[in-house]
């Protein structure tokens, strides 16, 4: 039942955007001229290419994010059964967290978190 | 406490009595879809009006007051205007991705919206891994934003989208850690069970005392950043990036981003109300029998909406009070302050729960 409702919600989102776009297309005016097709950017004629190499800083943060996100994924099942696991579970997860903090400390030390 | 299951079960048996099973399921799904769209639209309209009015009051202005009494019809006029604008296709844009992006943003926002527990039994998607599911679906939105910025063939859009991507994924870590800390306390990931537990045992923010209050404060900061708002609205810093990732969208295509931004804020507040402030649970005080008796008469949905608007006010207050951060300050705040703090809170909460320093 939940899965059916999940699919329903997904389809609702897709259908909503589709229907409203069609409606807006029907309601809106349409006109053509050559200048109108220019990208707006900031109002003055656009210059140079857009799709080119981008600063690597964002990529470093994405890699770091990946590491921590996978880690939270592993921690969720532990958090649910934490009470029944007792001290043994707690100690092992603290060890796991310690390794991750080491990872963060390493990235920090290497200057990956610095924006320049 | 009013249980919404009575209504849904009555409807189910009614439909089953004269229709085959597949038709019943179909009709129920259509009804659910209509309910989602209605709630989504109504709350978006309320929130846009509220945001404009509250922001005006913060800045000693009047806000919208021309269209209708107190400017109440302003939002409807805005919607009408956006609907009747042409959707312009620009040269050199990646047309396919440019038009796929709004689908992703709105679908992610609507699916997370249907995870909210409105009342006992009135929750559309209620997985037993609810919190995890919520986090997973909400991160689809960032793909839409990145696509929107990249496909526009506009330098400012690209910079805006990159900033937004870096910001959203960074602050998602803090949100995840805060959720983990609260799951340690509740021991369940299902939103309905979290609410039920809080009705029986008291709100999580009180049960978890100091770590939970700190988590709540950090959640308000990270939540504003997740919604690209407040002091963290670098992606659409209008004084330097025109309008960020949605500069090149026109008409209703722009409207989707506007809609999704406000509804993501609503969802963020809704999750805060569910996880920390009890969701639909009434404010019961042990020992005050008459008080509890009266409070239980009020339907859960009323409590839920009241709590959501309380959190929304806090988020708006935060937004209109602090000056905007630079992108490097923003990432430093997350990686060097928020993340270590939330990890410490997770450990503190785990220790508190293990050694029984929480109210059970």
Image (tube, coloured by chain):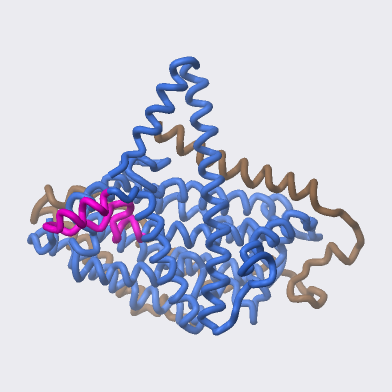
Residue B335 on the magenta segment: no
Q: Is residue B64 left or right of residue B81?
A: left
Between residues B331 and A54, which one lies in front from this camera angle?
B331
Residue B154 in picture, x, y percent from top left = 71, 68
- Compared to A70, does B215 lie above or below? below
Residue at 59 percent of width and 82 percent of height = B61
Is residue B227 in view?
Answer: yes
Residue at 32 percent of width and 72 percent of height = B217
- Chain identifier of the blue chain: B
Q: Is residue B305 left or right of residue B327?
A: left
Q: Quadrant of residue B64?
A: bottom right
Residue at 73 percent of width and 53 percent of height = B95
Residue A4 in picture, x, y percent from top left = 45, 32
Quarter of the rendering occupied by the N terminus of chain B: top left
- Chain identifier of the brown chain: A
Between residues B334 and B2, which one lies in front from this camera angle?
B2
- Compared to A94, does A76 lie above or below? above
Residue B339 in picture, x, y percent from top left = 33, 71
Is residue A102 in view?
Answer: no
Residue B291 on the magenta segment: yes
* Image: magenta residue range: B272-296
Quarter of the rendering occupied by the C terminus of chain B: bottom left
Q: Quadrant of residue B352?
A: bottom left
Q: Among all residues in the image, which is located at the extreme right?
A: A33
- Compared to A24, does B240 lie above or below? below
Residue B121 in picture, x, y percent from top left = 34, 39
Residue at 48 percent of width and 46 percent of height = B111
């Amino acid at each position: 039942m939940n899965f059916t409702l999940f699919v329903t919600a997904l389809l609702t989102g897709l259908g909503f955007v589709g229907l409203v776009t069609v409606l807006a297309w029907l309601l809106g005016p349409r006109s053509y001229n050559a200048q109108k097709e220019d990208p707006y950017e900031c109002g003055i004629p656009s210059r140079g290419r857009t799709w080119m190499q981008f600063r690597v800083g964002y990529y470093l943060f994405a890699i770091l994010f990946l590491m921590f996100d996978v880690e939270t994924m592993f921690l969720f099942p532990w958090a649910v059964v934490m009470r029944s696991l007792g001290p043994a579970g707690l100690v092992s997860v603290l060890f796991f967290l310690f390794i991750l903090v080491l990872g963060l400390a390493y990235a920090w030390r290497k200057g990956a978190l610095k924006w320049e | 406490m009013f249980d919404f299951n009575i209504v849904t079960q009555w409807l189910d048996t009614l439909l089953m009595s004269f229709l085959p099973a597949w038709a019943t399921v179909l009709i129920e799904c259509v009804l659910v879809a209509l309910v989602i769209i209605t709630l989504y639209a109504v709350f978006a309209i309320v929130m846009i009006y509220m945001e404009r009015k509250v922001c005006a009051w913060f800045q000693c202005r009047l806000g919208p007051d021309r269209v209708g009494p107190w400017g109440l019809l302003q939002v409807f006029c805005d919607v009408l205007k956006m609907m009747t604008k042409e959707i312009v296709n620009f040269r050199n844009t990646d047309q396919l991705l440019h038009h796929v992006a709004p689908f992703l943003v709105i679908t992610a926002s609507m699916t997370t919206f249907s995870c909210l527990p409105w009342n006992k039994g009135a929750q559309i998607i209620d997985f037993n891994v609810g919190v995890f599911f919520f986090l997973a679906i909400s991160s689809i939105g960032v793909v839409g934003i990145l696509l929107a910025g990249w496909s526009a063939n506009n330098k400012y859009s690209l910079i805006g989208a990159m900033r937004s991507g870096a910001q959203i994924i960074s602050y998602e870590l803090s949100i995840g850690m805060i959720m983990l800390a609260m799951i340690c306390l509740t021991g369940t990931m299902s939103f309905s069970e979290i609410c039920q537990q809080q009705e029986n045992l008291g709100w999580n923010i009180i049960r978890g005392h100091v770590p939970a209050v700190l988590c709540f404060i950090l959640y308000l900061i990270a939540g504003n950043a997740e919604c690209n708002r407040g002091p963290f609205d670098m992606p659409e810093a209008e004084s330097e990036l025109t309008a960020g990732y949605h500069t090149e969208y026109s008409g209703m295509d722009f409207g989707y981003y506007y809609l999704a931004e406000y509804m993501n804020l609503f969802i963020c507040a809704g999750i805060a109300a569910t996880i920390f402030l009890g969701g639909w649970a009434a404010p019961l005080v042990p020992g005050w029998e008459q008080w509890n008796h009266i409070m239980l008469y009020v339907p859960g949905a009323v409590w839920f909406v009241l709590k959501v608007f309380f959190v929304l006010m806090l988020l708006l207050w935060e937004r209109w009070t602090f000056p905007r951060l630079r992108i490097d300050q923003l990432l430093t705040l997350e990686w060097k302050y928020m993340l270590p703090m939330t990890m410490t809170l997770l450990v503190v909460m785990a220790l508190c729960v293990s050694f029984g320093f929480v109210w059970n």
